[in-house]
Image: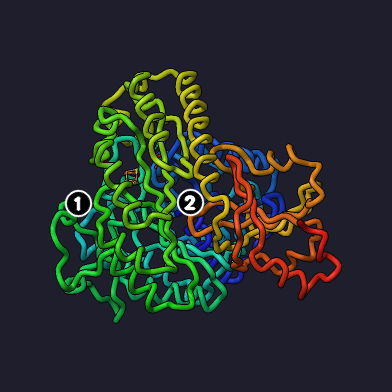
Amino acid sequence: MNELDSELVHGQLATLGYEFVSSANAAQVLLYNTCSVREQAEQKALSRIGIVGMRKKAGERLILGVIGCMAERDGLELFRRHPQVDFLCGPGELDRVPQLVDSAMRSLMADPSAALPRPSQHDRAALAGNKSRRTATLAAAEDGLEALDLSRAFDPIASGRPAHTAFVRITRGCNKFCTYCVVPSTRGAEIHRPPQHIIDECRRLVDHGAKEVTLLGQTVNHYRYQHGSAVTISGLETAQVGPGLSAFRAAPTARTTTFADLLRRIHEEVPELPRLRFVTSYPRDFGDDILDCMRDSPRICRYLHAPAQSGSDRILKLMNRGYTVSEYIDFVDRAFAHLPDASLAGDFIVGFPTETDDDFEATCALVRRLPFKNNFIFKYSPRPGTAAITRFADDVPDAVKRARNNALLAVQGEATARVHQRLIGTTHSVLFHEVRSRKGPRRDSNLFSPISVNGQSIDDQHAANPQSADHWQAIGRTQGDIIVAVSSSNAQMFSDFVGSLRQVVISSADSLLVHGDLVDAAATMTSRLPSEIGRRN
Ligand code: 5AD
Ligand code: SF4
């Protein structure tokens, strides 16, 4: 979600003529898009804010904006503690970033001395407060964020991110209130975008080369748009506050676009899109209608990121997750009954208040029992503004959290290896993202960050395997988000791989990735590399 926000802000500023540089040292305006989900992420942002503070003290004339969840959560207090911050903008107000940058620029230009006169702090902060939990009509009328999402119409892929993958937001915010989570307070109530806007955005992205679109929502399967009550402003249908959670116990009316309806419409109305994914699924309220639609739509990836968070019913209750372990297992069984080739991933939190060894063992048992391809594992981090921080003492010592984190990563590593082993001999369509050399630092990469699985970088695996003659690797992902490497001794073979989809048969596997051979390797080599024929096995 944050990545998409950065992309949209980038797009807006680029449209206004701002130029982007690759190093913070070369920039005059620094914007940090922050996350508050865990304390560690906030600490990282604070350290960068500290560095900018030192540069400003040393006389550099810079503008520092803090945007995203941390701005929303800390509010004006951030100005007091970090006077080097020029402006704040919460995730619900990102359409106002250009205006805030512009006003900071003007004050910087107006007085070249170090002591800059500043607008009042209220004019330097765009924070939603509790606005997003006001009435549907009011929220819709003030919904500049829909305009920000729609601004992509002018520059669909503004970020420099790989053009062949793109994110499209379908809902914002969350109505769930898990006790540990800041999202409902930093991003507000669930708001659903009009289906036509989403479909148009997917189509534009495909026109600009996207091969894979990922639909985004905190609880993406809660998507629900009620057409009879849509508010229209200046001829434009607006995003809509979502229904209460009880809505998922009743059948939708004829004028509702459900998540399944939305998936089906995108699949049918954007037939040139090779891959459609979605994250993150909330394991409850995930109806058979969605699974039926996935089964009947070959270009919808059979990939479910559905965080279980814990394998202990007692802890799930304290987390207010709204399901039991057996209900989670029923959901997974139902998913595999519809989609036998589905790929399952999730998140777990270890060291939640009062978590005992037995609770933790129940979590390990769940990871052993279900075919998770990977899980993101987090140590519980008490967050201000959440129910958990006021209700429960953070009573699991950090050393225990760390040990449980490592132990669960090891259990997950074995689960990943089992899932990978089962793929040997099967053929998959792979979307390639990167070509890299296993022996040197050279990369033809379209990814910003190194790929890691269950906390381990796939670069570690390259280092462990330096003797191979095939030292070029093309890295891609299956529909199920499994990382696939195809190796060759000749980089030319991969010259047009990034952004392409190819059939690969899996030949070997380990706990990080699977290795494979191109199904049409002979044809590929004949057309491009006659000298290579016969050298590969
Ligand atoms: N502490 C640790 N992990 C958290 N997550 C959310 N809030 C917290 C917290 N306070 C994790 C959950 C969620 C993922 C995005 O971050 O597992 O699914
Ligand atoms: Fe946070 Fe729970 Fe909502 Fe996910 S479902 S965003 S964990 S409150």
Badge 1 crowding class, 10 Å Cα cut-off, few under 14, some 14 to 19, many 20 or more, is few
Does the beta carbon of the residue at mark 2 sit less than 8 Å from ligand 1?
no
Residue 245 marker: 1
- C-beta proximity under 8 Å, tags 1 and 2: no
Residue hosting label 2: 67
Quick check: 282 left or right of 372?
Answer: left
Q: Is residue 142 above or below residue 414?
A: below
Q: Earlier in the sequence, mark 1 or mark 2?
A: 2
Does the beta carbon of the residue at mark 1 sit less than 8 Å from ligand 2?
no
Q: For the point 45% across and 50% down, which residue is it?
A: 68
Q: Is residue 281 above or below residue 39?
A: below
Q: Secondary structure at mark 2?
A: strand
Q: Is residue 87 above or below residue 406?
A: below
Given the image, on which type of amino acid does mark 1 rest? Leu
Q: Nearer the viewer, residue 318 or 125?
A: 318
Report how far apart the C-alphas of labels 1 and 2 lie in the structure. Answer: 30 Å
Location of residue 534 (image quadrant) = bottom right
Residue 24 marker: none
Quick check: 340 left or right of 516?
Answer: left
Residue 88 location in percent, x, y?
46, 50
Badge 2 crowding class, 10 Å Cα cut-off, few under 14, some 14 to 19, many 20 or more, is many
Given the image, on which type of amino acid does mark 2 rest? Ile
Q: For the point 78% across and 52% down, which residue is it?
A: 470
Q: Nearer the viewer, residue 8 or 298?
A: 298
Q: How many marks?
A: 2
Q: Secondary structure at mark 1?
A: helix
Q: Where does ligand 1 appear, by image quarter?
A: top left
1 or 2: mark nearer the eye = 1
Q: Quadrant of the C terminus?
A: bottom right
Q: Is residue 251 visible in the rendered structure shown here?
A: yes
Q: For the point 61% across and 55% down, which residue is it?
A: 29
Location of residue 17 (image quadrant) = bottom right
